[in-house]
Amino acid sequence: MAEVLVYVDHVDGSVRKPTLELLTIARRIGEPVAVHLGAGADTAAPVLAEYGAVKVLTADAPEFADYLVVPKVDALEAAVAAVSPAAVLVPSSADGKEIAARLAVRIGSGIITDAVDVEAGDEGPVATQSVFAAAFTTKSRVSKGTPVITVKPNSAAPEAAQAAGTVEQLAVTFGDKATGTKVTSRTPRESTGRPELTEAAIVVSGGRGVNGAENFPVIEALADSLGAAVGASRAAVDAGWYPHTNQVGQTGKQVSPQLYIAAGISGAIQHRAGMQTSKTIVAVNKDSEAPIFDLVDYGVVGDLFQVLPQLTEEVKARKG
Amino acid sequence: MSLRIVVCVKYVPDATGDRHFAEDLTTDRDAVDGLLSELDEYAVEQALQIAEDADDAEITVLTVGPEDAKDALRKALSMGADKAVHVEDDDLHGTDVVGTSLVLAKAVEHVGYDLVVCGMASTDGTMGVLPALLAERLGVPQATLLSEVSVEDGKVTGRRDGDAATEQLEAALPAVVSVTDLSGEARYPSFKGIMAAKKKPVESLDLSDLGIEADEVGLEGAWTKVEDATPRPPRTAGTIVKDEGEGGKQLAEFLAGQKFI
């Protein structure tokens, strides 16, 4: 059976959920071979095996942390040469997309980004994408070279499937371009204790209707009761009520959770571009004419300051 | 010595319009008005600021696209770029991102550059990979997704707002950078700028000028193939209730029914 390379997104060996989703997707196409770069392979390998990695290729070197993306491209290129995979799957993170892109040019292949699903096809993997603010769903494939596909978080539910997970060292020679862009400092994003916005299964977002930074705790309280991430519309971010890192929309983050709750958000096209692939959409807004109501599975026309606290209490009560 | 800056911009269908695919599954450019991709305005702005801080700099704005794409160049020229290069060729129709990076790389080399500035992504394809592809092809460092950028002593430095961390980057010129929408509001063209733009040179290039064969680009030469594009079925109308004191509880009931609680 053909092997499929899966690039492992991790923090010191703690594997992030989108990678487990990729391993699950990779099994539809062939046998997943995980590529773990940097420290922590010992911690990561058993987890990768549990989710179906038949092999874990590892390499560790200071270059991976000290320079931007290119050393990882060198390593992935070496992995492609070692394995001759049927496809290379990479999480659709900022780094992931850039690594995938450079790899594609190196190996003479096409690239598809932000797939929301990948299936096996007669002529290679077929990727589903959601485009033009989710107005269209496309199916595409890479027609030249080894398909390189980046996949959005929440595109599959991770399913455990124990495999051998044999750890092998990957020999990597860094090219002279590997050290071109130096990372002179790195500050991990301060943890809010909430899930990462793009990976969260549930997102609660606030917009203009929240009417001030001092009112965002209403959004946060609901999010915390649901174990959700907090998002904000551009209007709320531009007004300085919430950090830009939480902005959902065309010029912010694209999210695709199981449940998206929009509170006090009218639903301008730019916002819709960032959340329209959410599986279930709920909105609370005073204005019954707000375009967001065209998208919802369930909408409440009402004051978010009445509805959200009541919902939060109800969620807490039901969760006991 | 003059700092040569090339800004890559894209002419995109207006995102507020009703965007469609044409019969050959390329973007239907006739269906909706086009404009300079909003995220590229930030690139033009940063290029202008870098040029203002340099002793001597020249900004060339570059695009690959159909005849109408000149509008995007005019906008950038009216903001303050010095000259423009338009790569236009019938054989480019249907070129994908890998092909576009080839064309842009050849055009950037044709113009001559110390610094290439791009937006973080286009507002139509939204892939966000073009700057990295361009750096790979040019064989120069990439300093991408910068929310702050400065150029000094032959080096570009900047702050990258990544997924999990904020990083400070440093690379020697020549280099490719991309800037995010956090880099600073783009200026509006002044009347004077708009009038001046009409007199600024726009060089037109075709594939043969760049030494690119027709089969390396276009729909036939694309590295990816769109096999199917389906309009999303209209959502079945959702349930909408008016809050009369029980809205939160009703919503909780819905969420419980969907197994979210």
Image (cartoon, coloured by chain):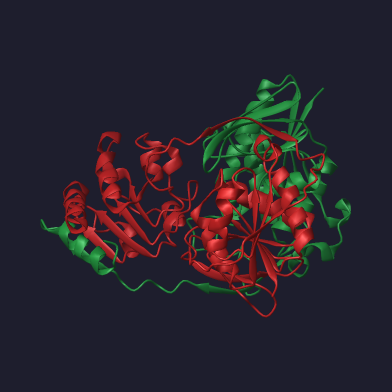
Chain colours: A red, B green
Q: Position of residue B159 (x, y in %)?
A: 58, 31
Looking at the image, residue B58 lies above or below residue B255: above
Query: Is residue A243 left or right of A173 when viewed as pictured?
Result: left
Residue A108 visible in the snapshot:
no
Task: Say which residue appears at 65% left-offset and 38% top-offset.
Answer: A65
Of residues B80 and A261, the one nearer the viewer is A261
Q: Position of residue A266 (x, y in %)?
A: 33, 52
The quarter of the image holding the C terminus of chain A is: bottom left
Quadrant in the picture for residue A168: bottom right
The quarter of the image holding the N terminus of chain A is: bottom right
Q: Position of residue A51 (x, y in %)?
A: 53, 63
Which residue is the extreme one toward the bottom? A122
Quadrant in the picture for residue A60: top right
Residue B211 visible in the snapshot:
yes
Which residue is the extreme one toward the top? B55
Of residues B39 and A101, the one nearer the viewer is A101
Task: Say which residue appears at 53% left-offset and 74% top-offset.
Answer: B230
Of residues A263 and B184, the one nearer the viewer is A263
Which residue is the extreme one toward the left? B245
Q: Position of residue B144 (x, y in %)?
A: 64, 40
Of residues A311 and A277, the one nearer the viewer is A311
Query: Is residue B16 left or right of B254 when viewed as pictured?
Result: right
Label total for image: 0
